């Protein structure tokens, strides 16, 4: 051993003890045996789309093209479309239109009335009613809400295509941060109280009561978050046959303002009714003096956010 310690070799022109080279080799060998990790996880998640349009996601959906030919003055009612929410929370979407019209200015669409119409089918007939949506929930928007103190009316156009001719009634949901939502209704147990002019129903503030029948004056500083238009007889679920109806509603407004376009899509477990969907169709109406040519409309169904008991979350921001 002593001889090994004294023995030297030439490395890069320098004399180095053989013992030191052996020690470095052993040290390197031991270091190479140390673990650098303790396990590996490879994750793979396959997702399905949360909201289906006409039963399809974007990978299988064939572009919907609705082509009509007619004479100025006509109204075209197109087939129904469905929005089905398969997520575990309510989802908020915006149904908005992009119109291109003939004439010198393609942005000037005077004489054209193009809009979505929401289909309401009262839940009656037992199994036959499963999957039908008897109401539509419209959100006022985080920036466009109105205090109950400033609420004047809720109004909408309606078009009954089958069954009872009764006008749909309206519920509104009031919200104040940190407190439970308050539901107000125009349902009084009898015929709806709405004022009806040329197929447009208007419910004024005085027509709303709490579910217990009391005055809503105590909620003056609450915000009106949601307007819900409901068909049939809401006091009986399912509705009796005498109140059964299919009705389309459109141009839903608060205080006679702009149309509400943000639609709340319920979960499949809402109200214990499986197969919940929101149904709508596009309507293309024209004045008799409309400019001749081709009117093109792109209907977008855009994702806005999610809805929970805490409020609405849009772009990561919670609006309570």
Image (tube, rainbow, N blue to C red):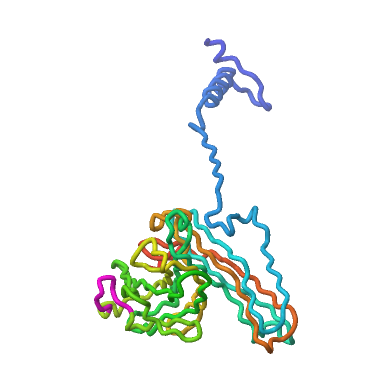
Q: Which residues are magenta?
A: 208-216
Instruction: From the viewer's side, name the closer residue of 214 and 79.
Output: 79
Relative placement, left or right, of 58 versus 153 is right
The verdict on residue 17 being magenta is no
The residue under the point 38% across, 85% down is 152
Percent coordinates x, y for residue 204 in the rendering: 37, 84
Using residue 258 as the reference point, say whether residue 14 is left or right of it.
right
Image quadrant in which you'd find residue 221: bottom left
Percent position of residue 194, x then y: 40, 81
Q: Nearer the viewer, residue 122 or 290?
A: 122
> Quadrant where the C terminus lies?
bottom left
Furthest residue in direction front, as rendered: 242
Residue 210 sits inside the magenta stretch: yes
Position of 269 compared to 188: left or right?
right
Indicate the quadrant where residue 232 lies.
Answer: bottom left
Question: Residue visible at 65% across and 53% down?
Answer: 60
């Amino acid at each position: 051993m002593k001889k090994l310690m004294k023995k030297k070799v030439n490395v890069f022109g320098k004399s180095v003890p053989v013992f030191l080279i052996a020690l470095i080799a052993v040290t390197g060998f031991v270091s190479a045996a140390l673990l650098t990790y303790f396990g590996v996880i490879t994750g793979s998640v396959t997702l399905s789309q949360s909201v289906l349009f006409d039963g399809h996601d974007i990978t299988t959906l064939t572009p919907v093209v609705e082509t009509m030919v007619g004479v100025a003055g006509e109204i075209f009612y197109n087939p129904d479309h469905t929005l089905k929410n398969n997520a575990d929370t309510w989802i908020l979407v915006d149904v908005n239109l992009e119109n291109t019209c003939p004439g010198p200015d393609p942005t000037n669409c005077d004489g054209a009335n193009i809009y979505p119409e929401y289909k309401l089918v009262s839940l009656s007939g037992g199994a036959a009613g499963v999957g039908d949506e008897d109401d539509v929930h419209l959100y006022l928007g985080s920036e466009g809400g109105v205090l109950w103190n400033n609420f004047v009316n809720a109004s909408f156009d309606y078009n009954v295509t089958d069954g009872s001719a009764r006008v749909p009634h309206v519920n509104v949901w009031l919200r104040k941060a940190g407190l439970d939502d308050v539901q107000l209704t125009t349902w009084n147990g009898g015929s709806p109280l709405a004022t009806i002019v040329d197929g447009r129903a208007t419910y004024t503030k005085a027509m709303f009561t709490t579910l217990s029948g009391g005055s809503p004056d105590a909620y003056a500083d609450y915000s009106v978050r949601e307007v819900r238009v409901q068909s049939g007889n809401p006091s009986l679920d399912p509705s009796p046959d005498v109140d059964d109806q299919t009705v389309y509603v459109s141009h839903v407004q608060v205080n006679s303002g702009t149309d509400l376009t943000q639609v709340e899509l319920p979960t499949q477990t809402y109200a214990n009714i499986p197969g919940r969907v929101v149904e709508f169709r596009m309507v293309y109406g024209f004045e008799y003096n409309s400019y001749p040519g081709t009117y093109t409309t792109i209907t977008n169904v855009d994702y806005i956010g999610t809805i929970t008991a805490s409020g609405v979350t849009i772009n990561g921001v919670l609006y309570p």
